[in-house]
Image: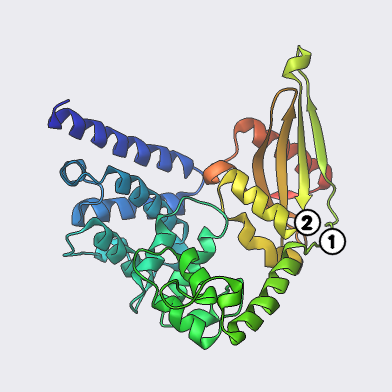
Amino acid sequence: MSDMVRKNQKRWIIDQAIHETISGYKNDKLRKTAFLSLVEAVRRESDLLRPEYILRQGNFGFLKSCFQGLCNITRHYRDWIRLPALWSTNEESLLKQFQSLVNHQFTNHSVPIFMLSAWLEDPGPGCWQKQIWYRHVGLGNNIRGANLPVKLTKKMAEDFMKAPDHFNVDQALTCSIYGFPEKVNPFFYGMTKKRRKWHIVNCNKLKQEMNEHWKHAAIADFKLEEENETAWSYRLWSIKQIRTRAELIEEGNELHHCVADYAQMCAVGKTTIWSMKCNGRLTSYHSITIEVDPNERVIREARGKFNRWPTDQEQEIIQKWAEKENLQIAI
């Protein structure tokens, strides 16, 4: 295959990915506009979406991560502090160019490069929160003030910020707690007395949080049997409230989005999360995650795998549930 053919193939892949992303934003004009402004700036000022540069550098794998990064930046468009049109960079490496873009959109202060991994991750449990940590540090705040799953000591926070560039956020957080391999034995009995005490207290706290559950909202679960000609094509659709942190994490793992970050809001009754599933004779799967404001009885959001929008059939089922429970739909 000639270089020209490979170049055209990669250009087609990039254009197709952009088109599919825009199609996913068809019901959200503001997010669609934000994404297009990012793509325009990136194509004008950098090599991140240039197939000839990707081909020459052999960084096609990074192109995929970079495109996911643009989608992640778009998800936070309401928190941009600058317009993408004002961005420019003189960096040569792809990673530095992407970091420059993230910093332009969200930060006024330097952020350790290992934290950039939060923006290159596929959607999943905790990715949204890690991106918020990046923004928190980039605005000049101490990482201890971020909404971390555990409370770090000052020394742990210092260790976290000094993590090696090749670490990701999870590795840095773990090593800041247990100690970095070159400094401290990472196993429990190799810890200092102070860190051992911290570990006991916080691990018990995390265990309690995983077992935490909250009351069912004053909204009923829902079931709908789909009428089909044959028994093998039978399907039962269900919508059920998620009432534990563990269930939220499972939902996020199944659908590759950040619903697990809603645990605290669910626990205090500010919002409720519901899981739509499809159960058939041969297969069963998670379909859509739904957010409902229990006080105003409004469906705020409904997303499927990788934050896709509901299909027409899924939308119809949500509509039937809303009519039965007297819910308004704001999606």
User: Which residue is found at the position 50% from the left and 64% from the top?
Assistant: 170
* Residue under the image location 71 percent in, 33 percent down: 278
Above or below for 26 versus 212: above
Residue 125 x, y percent position in the rendering? 57, 56
Give neighbour class at mark 2: few <14, some 14-19, many 20+ (Cα, 10 Å): many
Residue drawn 77% across the image and 50% down it: 241
User: Which residue occupies 17% across, 25% down?
Assistant: 1
**Looking at the picture, how far across and down is residue 167, in whole percent?**
40, 64
Q: Is residue 215 left or right of residue 21?
A: right
- Residue corresponding to mark 1: 215
Q: Quadrant of residue 90?
A: bottom left
Q: Residue furthest top?
A: 229
Residues at discs 2 and 1 in contact (Cβ within 8 Å): yes
Instruction: Give the vertical position of 271 relative to 219 (above or below).
Output: below
Name the residue tied to disc 2: 243
Looking at the image, can residue 97 be seen?
A: yes
The amino acid marked with disc number 1 is Lys
